[in-house]
Image (spheres, rainbow, N blue to C red):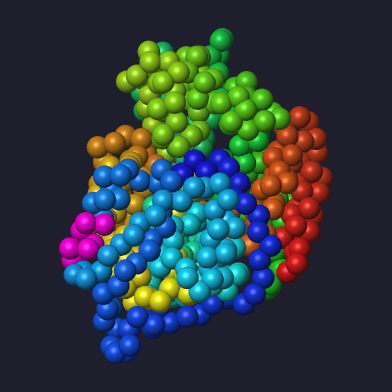
């Protein structure tokens, strides 16, 4: 589910092999003219990605517009999905279309069993895709994952506390954000609750400065937390984090930040908009008192950079119905499904031009605005191992507890370089 890609770590897989470069119009298209033949297709969606209404509606629509074709949409559990997908890609009986976490595409592409869909990008309107989904779907210049839907973090704020502080308009720049948060951080009120190990938020500040978590030089990945840009991002995080009482040695799940915010004495928290549901569940008195705005950028011209979590679609090379599988992908990535899905599920659609459909939903609209400056984690098959070993979290705690930022960043970068270079 979406939460898994926003706050949890994908399973680390030891994958090897050449990247697949299969013709997406082959196999099920013996005529060679690109016309897909009717087929019985198997499609994997992840649990809780969509409501039953959305799934059944798509199935009915697709089958009615593609006579003779049937869809067997199977819902998969997140637990153990990495190995299950890897095994399917290596088999002779793979599903025809699979939903995968956007940060997982590089892992699966490295297994050699994913169809290269680069020649379909123009047909799908890829120049309008939100970057945080498009970038991780592209490996070594080839598009293996097709952007599907996304979610990213925004600022959830307590309207009563903003009003009491005389703040009538949410900030749109970092400078104003710091000024407002400083004003809010008084007496028993925390200006912001920002745990010390919320590294996805740190990533956005680093990207805003022009830095990155890791950079690729040829076939080699190197940690980049020790660059001047990354250090500037960490310095801003430290400044913002000090305007509240968030723990310096844990993340947003420990304790659950929604529960902390629900007590009513926290002015802001950084979360996906869905966090508001948990907040009002913990404290129903806050119903109607929560506002949302995109994480501010360095200037008002663009919101702050954010990590885009979400899903891409892949077509296994072993699918015997390549042409029709692409038709499924095209429909799922197309305007009708995207707009219906966005309204029903409050997800960010895969194209910036579709974002207007979320205009009536304050939280989703703020999320969509931020998604225009979305980014992804380094597109290395070994990135999951960096997350699993908490390299960035431990670095952040060292800095926030008084350690030398440059020294801690250099050590963390060296550790990342070693992990990213394993078996490469």
What percent of the width, then of the height, locates residue 421?
A: 75, 64
* Residue 200 seen: no
Please tell me which residue is depicted at 43% across the width and 69% down the height of the picture.
Answer: 315
- Give left or right: position of 222 versus 282: right
Say above or below: 321 vs 76.
below
Magenta stretch: includes residue 61: yes
Looking at the image, how many numbered discs can be counted on the residues? 0
* Residue 9 inside the magenta-drawn segment: no
**In which quadrant will I find the C terminus?**
bottom right
Q: Residue at x 39, y 31 (%)?
A: 292
Residue 137, above or below 117:
above
Tell me if residue 421 can be seen.
yes
Depth check, front residue: 69 or 355: 69
Q: Quadrant of residue 241?
A: top right
Compare residues 47 and 397 and report the one nearer the observer. 47
Q: Is residue 206 left or right of residue 285?
A: right
Residue 110 drawn at (x, y percent): 60, 69
Magenta residues span 59-65
- Magenta part, dominant SS: helix
Q: Is residue 212 above or below residue 63?
A: above
Residue under the image location 47 percent in, 80 percent down? 22
**Residue extending farthest top:** 187
Residue 160 higher or lower than 39, as above or below: above
Q: In the image, is 329 to the left or to the right of 115? A: left
Residue shown at the point (57%, 63%) measured from the top left:
86
Instruction: Specify whether 341 is left or right of 162.
Output: left
């Amino acid at each position: 589910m979406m939460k898994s890609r926003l706050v949890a770590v994908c399973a680390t897989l030891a994958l090897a092999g050449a990247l697949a470069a299969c013709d997406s119009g082959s196999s099920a298209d013996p005529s060679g003219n690109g016309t897909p033949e009717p087929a019985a297709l198997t499609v994997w969606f992840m649990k809780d990605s969509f409501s039953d209404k959305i799934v059944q509606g798509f199935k009915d629509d697709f089958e009615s517009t593609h006579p003779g074709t049937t869809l067997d949409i199977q819902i998969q559990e997140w637990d153990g999905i990495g190995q299950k997908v890897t095994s399917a890609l290596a088999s002779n009986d793979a599903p025809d279309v699979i939903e995968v976490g956007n940060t997982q595409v590089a892992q699966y592409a490295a297994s050699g069993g994913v169809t290269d869909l680069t020649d379909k990008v123009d047909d799908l309107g890829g120049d309008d895709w939100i970057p945080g989904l498009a970038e991780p779907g592209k490996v070594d210049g080839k598009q293996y994952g097709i952007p599907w839907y996304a979610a990213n973090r925004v600022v959830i704020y307590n309207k009563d506390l903003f009003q009491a502080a005389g703040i009538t308009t949410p900030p749109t720049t970092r400078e104003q954000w710091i000024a407002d948060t400083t004003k809010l951080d008084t007496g028993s009120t925390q200006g912001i609750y920002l745990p010390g190990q919320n590294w996805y938020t740190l990533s956005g500040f680093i990207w805003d400065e022009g830095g990155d978590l890791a950079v690729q030089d040829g076939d080699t990945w190197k940690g980049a937390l020790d660059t001047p840009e990354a250090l500037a991002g960490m310095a801003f995080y430290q400044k913002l984090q000090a305007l509240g009482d968030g723990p310096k040695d844990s993340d947003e799940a420990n304790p659950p930040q929604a529960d902390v915010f629900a007590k009513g004495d926290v002015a802001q928290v950084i979360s996906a908009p869905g966090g508001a549901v948990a907040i009002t569940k913990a404290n129903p008195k806050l119903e109607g008192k929560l506002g949302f705005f995109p994480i501010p950028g360095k200037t008002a011209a663009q919101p702050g950079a954010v990590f885009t979590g979400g899903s891409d679609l892949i077509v296994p090379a072993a699918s015997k119905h390549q042409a029709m599988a692409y038709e499924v992908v095209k429909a799922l990535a197309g305007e009708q499904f995207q707009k219906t899905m966005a309204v029903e599920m409050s997800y960010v659609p895969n194209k910036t031009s579709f974002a207007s459909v979320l205009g009536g939903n304050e939280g989703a609209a703020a999320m969509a605005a931020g998604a225009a400056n979305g980014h992804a984690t380094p597109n290395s098959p070994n990135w999951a191992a960096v997350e699993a070993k908490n390299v960035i979290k431990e670095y952040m705690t060292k800095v926030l507890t008084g350690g030398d930022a440059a020294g801690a960043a250099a050590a963390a970068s060296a550790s990342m370089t070693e992990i990213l270079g394993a078996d490469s």
